[in-house]
Image (tube, rainbow, N blue to C red):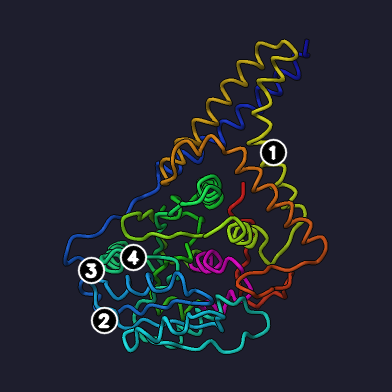
């Protein structure tokens, strides 16, 4: 028979687990949704929006992204694609759409810069619009997307507005892992709180974010966060610190993305975000402990209670299992994966554990962040006035 102290400790831990799991559901419910605006709304922005798209080895994704931009029902000032030395036919894809799409060659990457920030900064310098729209090559847009986003930003008085697209999940590992990834983004960044007056929460989604040029220039744009892997979040934090208005919304009807094509690409992409360029062994160890303590250990409570003959632990364990599996089934369905994949959430947690453990080992060995064929050394020197990545990454 277990002592009362052990049982009480288990009950308290169970409450903590339930509160954390409920947080993701509550934040998802609070997340504002942006749907296509009625015809005419935002039409006054015609000719004022410049699009910047950084492309490196994007032959497969880029055609659909560019065609959806060319199909916008708002006249864009320009579409600039910054080509980053691709090893595939990315360049030809852009040239086939000239002159409606303009190709800009990315200059050699300077020391201290992350490739995407350098490409976005280069593209921004080549445009003249009052609004800058940064879009990733794997995003496809509804024809009303840009008009709707500009109308929303102007209505809200936002200096920076960003949306979360609908995520396509076609493969097994995408359907298992990405619903958990979305939950971590929600809970890490407290996404709906970005829209609250007086909130200190800040985030942006680099897949699609719109910014007023004047504010972008005032705060140094990508140059101010040149060494950050999560440059979108770092820029949003600079805007928040400067008192600028930020807006974020879920917009499944405006944009769609397939983030990763296979398990390897998904592993490397999530590892890049978790690892960053400011490695902290203590933080990564805390992530590992959080993953185990919040997702795996609760599943052990019912069988342990059964083995030791504790009715209290059996009941608590049963409640936790129903809550955990039910929550992940509901979340999988909400974000577009078949609901049954939520039952495999322990496998998704295991995937994340391997990612974070890899980050920890790599960091302790002085490794680097790699993405799109480029490697970035850890602990890059601080750039004066630059924002810090901080603890905000998609992990618990």
- Pointer 2 with pointer 4, Cβ within 8 A: no
* Mark toward the start of the polypeptide (2 vs 4): 2
Q: Residues within 10 Å of mark 2 (few under 14, many from 20)?
A: some
Q: Which residues are magenta?
A: 220-239
On whether residue 45 falls in the magenta region, the answer is no
Place of residue 224 in the rendered image (x, y in percent of width and height, measured from the top left): 57, 77
**Within the image, what quadrant is residue 334 found in?**
top left
**Within the image, what quadrant is residue 281 found in?**
bottom right
Q: CA distance from mark 1 to mark 4?
A: 38 Å
The reply to whether residue 177 is in sight is yes
* Mark toward the start of the polypeptide (1 vs 2): 2
Q: CA distance from mark 2 to mark 4?
A: 18 Å
Depth check: give the residue in front, 160 or 354: 354
Q: Secondary structure at mark 2?
A: loop
Residue found 45% across the figure and 59% down from its top: 258
* Mark toward the start of the polypeptide (1 vs 3): 3
Locate residue 41 relative to residue 89 in the image: left or right. left
Q: Which residue is mark 1?
A: 292
* Mark toward the start of the polypeptide (4 vs 3): 3
Chief secondary structure of the magenta portion: helix
Vertical arrangement, residue 48 with respect to residue 206, above or below: below
Depth check: give the residue in front, 225 or 253: 253
Q: Secondary structure at mark 1?
A: helix
Locate residue 352 relative to residue 121 in the image: left or right. right
Q: Secondary structure at mark 4?
A: strand
Q: Which residue is mark 4?
A: 141
Place of residue 46 in the rendered image (x, y in percent of width and height, measured from the top left): 24, 77
- Pointer 1 with pointer 4, Cβ within 8 A: no
- Pointer 4 with pointer 3, Cβ within 8 A: no
Q: Which residue is mark 3?
A: 42
**Rendered image: mark on residue 47:** 2
């Amino acid at each position: 028979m277990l002592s009362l102290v052990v049982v009480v400790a288990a009950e308290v831990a169970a409450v903590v687990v339930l509160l954390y799991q409920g947080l993701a559901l509550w934040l998802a419910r609070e997340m504002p949704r942006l749907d296509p605006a009625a015809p005419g709304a935002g039409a006054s922005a015609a000719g004022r929006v410049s699009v910047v798209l950084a492309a490196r080895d994007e032959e497969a994704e880029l055609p659909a992204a560019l065609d959806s931009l060319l199909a916008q029902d708002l006249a864009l000032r320009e579409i600039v694609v910054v080509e980053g030395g691709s090893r595939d036919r990315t360049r030809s894809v852009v040239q086939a759409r000239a002159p409606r799409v303009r190709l800009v060659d990315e200059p050699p990457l300077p020391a201290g810069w992350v490739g995407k920030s350098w490409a976005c900064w280069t593209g921004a310098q080549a445009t003249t619009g009052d609004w800058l729209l940064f879009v990733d090559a794997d995003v496809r847009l509804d024809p009303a997307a840009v008009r709707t986003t500009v109308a929303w930003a102007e209505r809200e008085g936002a200096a920076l507005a960003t949306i979360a697209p609908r995520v396509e999940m076609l493969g097994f590992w995408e359907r298992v892992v990405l619903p958990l990834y979305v939950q971590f983004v929600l809970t890490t960044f407290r996404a709906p709180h970005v829209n609250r007056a007086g909130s200190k929460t800040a985030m942006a989604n680099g897949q699609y974010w719109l910014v007023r040029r004047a504010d972008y220039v005032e705060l140094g744009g990508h140059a101010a966060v040149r060494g950050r892997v999560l440059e979108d979040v770092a820029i949003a934090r600079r805007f928040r610190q400067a008192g600028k208005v930020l807006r974020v919304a879920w917009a499944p009807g405006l944009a769609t993305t397939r983030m990763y094509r296979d398990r390897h690409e998904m592993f490397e992409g999530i590892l890049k975000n978790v690892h960053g360029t400011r490695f902290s062994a203590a933080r990564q160890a805390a992530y590992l402990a959080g993953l185990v303590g919040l997702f795996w250990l609760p599943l052990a409570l019912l069988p342990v209670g059964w083995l030791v003959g504790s009715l209290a632990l059996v009941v608590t364990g049963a409640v936790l299992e129903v809550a955990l599996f039910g929550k992940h089934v509901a979340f999988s369905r909400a974000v577009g994966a078949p609901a049954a994949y939520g039952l495999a959430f322990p496998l998704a947690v295991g995937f994340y554990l391997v990612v974070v453990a890899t980050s920890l080992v790599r960091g302790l060995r002085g490794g680097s962040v790699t993405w799109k064929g480029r490697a970035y050394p850890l602990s890059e020197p601080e750039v004066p006035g630059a924002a810090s990545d901080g603890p905000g990454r998609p992990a618990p």
